Amino acid sequence: MALDTEYYPDRVDSVSIELRAYTNGDFHISYIEVYSGDRRRCRWDRHDQPHNSRDHYHPLPAASTAAAVDHEYATDLTRVVETTVLPWIDDRVGIRWDSVA
């Protein structure tokens, strides 16, 4: 899903969200932003792996495994999007505008 770049400063070339949901309750939600030609990504995850708890977050700028932090998410994926991802994106839009000023 591509986000409307009109809400972002001109230097933001593209913004998208990728959401993968699995029947066992696992998910991956990625926010991808191309800003002045630089690709930035973060990711909210629920899956078993050795580096963090099942629920975890990979922050900007590269969503790296080394930077991942444990996180607790709502049980329902729709609630995760409503209470975690969309508010984060709203804050991110503000951060992008503040960086222009």
Image (cartoon, rainbow, N blue to C red):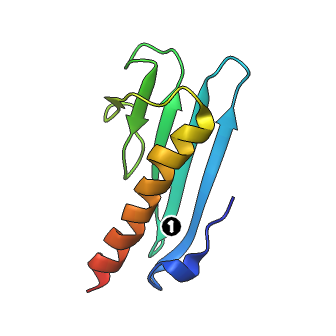
Considering only vertical position in the picture, is 13 above or below 83?
A: below
Q: How many marks?
A: 1
23 left or right of 37? right
**Image coordinates for residue 67, horizontal then vertical, percent:** 31, 36
99 left or right of 14? left
Considering only vertical position in the picture, is 20 above or below 53?
A: below
Residue in view at x 53 percent, y 48 percent: 82
The residue labelled by disc 1 is 34
Return the residue nearer the eye: 96 or 39: 96
**Quadrant where the C terminus is found in the figure:** bottom left
Considering only vertical position in the picture, is 32 above or below 98?
A: above
**Image coordinates for residue 88, horizontal then vertical, percent:** 41, 54
Q: Secondary structure at mark 1?
A: strand
Q: Is residue 10 visible?
A: yes
Residue in view at x 52 percent, y 39 percent: 80
Residue in view at x 48 percent, y 15 percent: 49
**Tag 1: Cα neighbours inside 10 Å, few (<14), some, or many (≥20)?**
some
Q: Is residue 40 visible?
A: no
Return the residue nearer the eye: 91 or 35: 91
**Image coordinates for residue 84, horizontal then vertical, percent:** 45, 45
Query: In the rendered structure, which amino acid carries the disc numbered 1?
Result: Val
**Image coordinates for residue 9, horizontal then vertical, percent:** 44, 82
Return the residue nearer the eye: 58 or 84: 84
Q: Quadrant of residue 2?
A: bottom right
Residue in view at x 37 percent, y 63 percent: 91
Considering only vertical position in the picture, is 76 above or below 59?
A: above
**Quadrant where the N terminus is found in the figure:** bottom right
